[in-house]
Amino acid sequence: MTQPSDFREVNFDGLVGPTHNYAGLAHGNVASMSHEGLASNPREGALQGLAKMKSLYDAGFSQGVLPPQQRPDLGALRALGFAGSDRQVLERAAREAPPVLRAVCSASSMWTANAATVSPSVDTADGRVHFTPANLQSSFHRYLEPATTARVLAAIFRDEACFAHHPVLPATPAFSDEGAANHTRLCERYGEAGVNLFVYGRRAFGGDVEPRRYPARQALEASQAIARQHGLGDRQAVFAQQHPDAIDAGVFHNDVIAVGNGPVLLYHDMAFRDEENTLEAIRDTLSTPLIPVRVPSEAVSLEEAVASYLFNSQLLSQPDGSMTLVVPGECQENESVWRTIQDLLLAGYNPISEVMVKDVKQSMRNGGGPACLRLRVVLSARERQALSGRVLLDESLYHELTAWVERHYRDRLVPDDLADPQLAEESLTALDELTQLLQIGSVYPFQRA
């Protein structure tokens, strides 16, 4: 019989893809827009991501790996009327539609917090782990991801006795879904039923104050549909609106302004439109006392929160009940943010007892911190054994992936390079080798043609 102690949270990090570049595609993502056109370093980005994974594995946390998407997406270009050889398709797209070319080359799937919403078996009606890939319909470059994401998740979480997969929600504004970046699960222990906090930016059919500057990407109706798909009971889901002013400040996902783990909710005072009622709703449904850790604007402004990505940190449980906060290096560079982190460690009223600083600058410049880079999946021992492929990090896999990156990735990429057919060839060669290394089969369009 499965015991609560059999459950662990596995963080599945997305590998940074070979076409990682700064195209400034994400409207409302301040970091992405401000670094548009700069030279990127795909090799450094991938190695930084792997180094973060390895440090957490070394610290005793369960760590998984998810592959990047096939980029450039030549199939998307052909569907838009660009014909001919691969070279001709790329050259014509570069000449006639440069923004479209940049979009089909985006390595945005590295931020796997947007890949899907996941509910553990202890929460669902049928006792299986449920997955719904996000439709990501808010932006064209991310709208291209769900089909491959669904195949990857189905290849890894294949055992139908343990895992259930749902189709993406209709790709319309009414059901705009950005995945786990707007979902936090709170509980006493991973192996016990928890409360799912779904945070939305707007109601598709009206009724809420919406942001004025940047779009709200998550619809309430999408979050409600996922809760129904996953068989979550009424007392297992809380729906709260993100503060419109936070979205207008560049908080495009809730995980840029709040992070939860176990009974702890670390959040900025501008995270929720109705802070008091949101906390009360969680308390009413959570089986253990909620530990809210509130950071006031006087300590860290919205602008500082967005610049440092303090709340886009990972909050991880240690065996003794204490927690580790994994922050990007930018937090250490901001005096107010770093002081606040030290205050959290000394507060005594919360379990956060350690901070780990990680260099993920290549990701940060495109608007993704440590929390963006991972999809959280709570699994029992039996469910971990049921995983297919070679996706749980260990010493051997880490060194093989590092060597793979060193063999295949460029150390400099600018937007003009995206039309280079050699880059497309390099990317396909790398991905074909990666699927063999991870033992996940033919998940990419070019492998299935």
Image (spheres, helix red, strand yellow):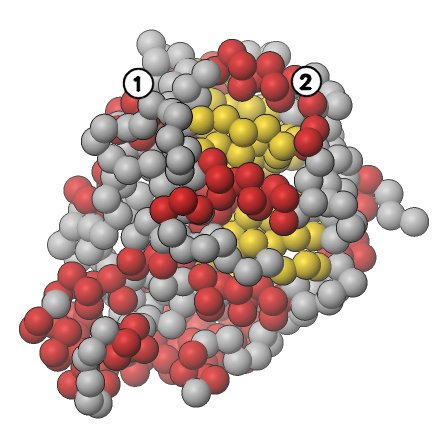
Q: Is residue 122 left or right of residue 277?
A: right
Residue 378, visible in the rendered structure = no
Residue at the image point whose x is 80% and y is 57% from the top? 382
Question: Looking at the image, is 279 positioned above or below residue 46?
Answer: above
Tell me if residue 257 comes above or below residue 116 in the rendering: above
Asked if the residues shown at circle 2 and circle 1 are in contact, with their CB atoms under 8 angstroms apart, the answer is: no
Q: Which three-letter amino acid code belongs to the residue tagged 2?
A: Asp
Q: Position of residue 40 (x, y in %)?
A: 22, 57
Residue assigned mark 1 = 301
Name, please, the residue furthest toward the left: 95
Q: Residues within 10 Å of mark 2 (few under 14, many from 20)?
A: some
Q: Would residue 149 appear left or right of 321 to someone viewing this image?
A: left
Residue at the image point whose x is 40% and y is 62% from the top: 145
Q: Is residue 436 among the parts visible in the rendering?
A: yes
Q: Quadrant of the C terminus?
A: bottom left
Quarter location, residue 250 = top left
Q: Which SS class for mark 1?
A: loop
The structure residue drawn at horizontal position 78% and vertical position 63%, both measured from the top left corner, is 161
Q: Quick check: 139 above or below 406?
A: above
Q: How many marks?
A: 2
Q: Which mark is residue 284?
A: 2
Image location (x, y in percent) of residue 181: 46, 41
Residue 72, image x, y percentages: 29, 72
Give whichever of discs 2 and 1 has the lower sequence position: 2
Which quadrant holds residue 232?
top right
**What distance separates the C-alpha of mark 2 from that of mark 1?**
30 Å
